[in-house]
Image (cartoon, rainbow, N blue to C red):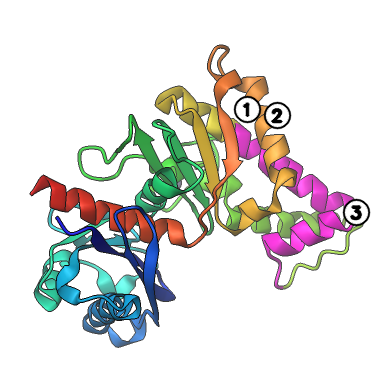
Amino acid sequence: MSTLTVGVDLGGTNTRAGLVTGGGEIVGRARYPTRLDLGSDAVVGGIADCVRGAISDGGVDPSKVGGVGVGSPGPLNLETGVIISPENLPCMRGVPLKALLESELGRTVAVDNDANLAAYGEQWMGVGRGVGNFLCVTLGTGIGGGWVADGKLMRGFNGNAAEIGHISLNLNGPRCPCGNHGCFELYASATAMVRRTRERLSQEQPETMLEPDGLTTEAISRAAEAGDAFAAEMFEQTGFLMGAGLVSLVNVMNVEMIALAGGMARAGERLFEPARRTFLERGTVGVKEFVRIVPAALGDDAGILGAARLARDAAAER
Ligand SMILES: [Zn+2]
C-alpha cells in the first residue's frame, strides 16, 4: 500500500485537497472554488484538478500516491458514493461522485460525510489523538457530528449515524426541515444563536452594542469580550443548550471526549464554561466526571486528514 493518499474536503464555497503521508502530515495542498454555478461536471472536474494540484504541490511522482478520500456534505450513499440530496450543493443531487472521480483520476476513491471525516481527522491527528471513544461536534449553519467508537468511525446501517443536530431538545419546538421538532441545531448552532439574538434585539431592545444587521457569533463574542452583558448572556444561554444536548449524546455514545469545532467554538470559555457546567449538572454520575469537552484542534485540516485516512482504510480493505 502506498503511504501517500489524498484527502479532499468538498465545501459549498471551496474544494480543498491535501496530499497526506501515512504519519498524518500534509505535504501538498490545493484549493479551488467549488463551481456550483457551472453544474455537477464542473464540480467533479474541479475536485479532480484539486487532487492533481495537491499531488503536484507535494512534488511527488503521481504513481507513488494511493487512493483518494472525499468528504462531502451528506446525505450520501457510502457504498455507491452517490450524493443523495445535499442542501448546500443542489447541483450534485444524485451524482455518482465516486464512480465519476475514479474514472477521471484512475484511482480508488472513497467518500463519506464531511462531519464524519472531520471527526476521523481530529481523532487521528488532532485533539482526539489516542482517544478511542470520541465525538466531534461541528457548529455552523447546523450541527454536524462524527462519532468514533473503539477507534472505528461509526456509520450506521446506511451512513447516517451521529446526525446529532437532529436529536430533539424540545418536543413541541419549531418544525425542522428534517421532519422532527425542536432539533438540537435549531437551538445551539451558530445560525440558531444569531437568530435568537436577533429576535431578542427586536423584541426586548436590550442595552447592548450589538446591531441586528450583519450579526455573527464572532460579533457577539467580541461584544461579550468588551463587557456587553447582553452578549455574554447569549453565550451563557447557548452554552447551556449545548451542554444539555451533549448530556443526551453521551448517554447514548459513552464517549470520553467531545471536541467542538467551527467558528463559534473559537469563542472559548464563554461557550465552554456554561456547556461544561450544564453537562456536570445533568449528566450521569459515574460518567460525566470523566468526559472532557474541549475545542477541536485542526480547523479546516480535520476534514482533509479524515478523508486521507479514509482512503488508507479503503486501500487496506482491498
Ligand atoms: Zn432536525
Residue 231 vertical placement versus 288 (above, below): below
Q: CA distance from mark 1 to mark 3?
A: 26 Å
The residue wearing badge 1 is 279
- Secondary element at image label 3: loop
Q: Is residue 54 left or right of residue 126?
A: left
Q: Amino acid at mark 2?
A: Arg
Residue nearest the viewer, comparing 14 with 304: 304
Please determine whether, in this image, residue 287 is positioned above or below residue 74. above
Q: Is residue 218 rendered to the left or right of residue 100?
A: right
At x 70%, y 53%, the residue is: 267
Asked whether disc 2 touches disc 3, contact meaning CB atoms under 8 Å apart, the reply is no
How far from the left and from the top, in percent, is residue 19? 32, 68
Instruction: State which tag comes first along the sequence, 1 or 3.
Output: 3
Residue at 76% across / 57% down in the picture? 221
Mark 1–mark 2 CB contact (< 8 Å): yes
Q: Which residues are magenta?
A: 214-243
Q: Secondary structure at mark 2?
A: helix
Q: CA distance from mark 2 to mark 3?
A: 21 Å
Label 2: which residue? 277
Q: Which amino acid lies under the numbered mark 3 shown in the image of this protein?
A: Gly
Report the disc number at residue 227: 3
- Residue 73 lies, in percent from the top left, at 35, 60
Q: Quadrant of residue 307?
A: bottom left
Name which residue lies at 33% across and 29% down.
150
Does residue 101 show up magenta in the picture?
no
CA separation in Å, label 1 and label 2: 5 Å
Whole-percent x and y of residue 33? 40, 82
Q: Is residue 241 magenta?
A: yes
Rendering coords of residue 112 (x, y %): 27, 54
Q: Residue at x 20, y 67 (%)?
A: 65
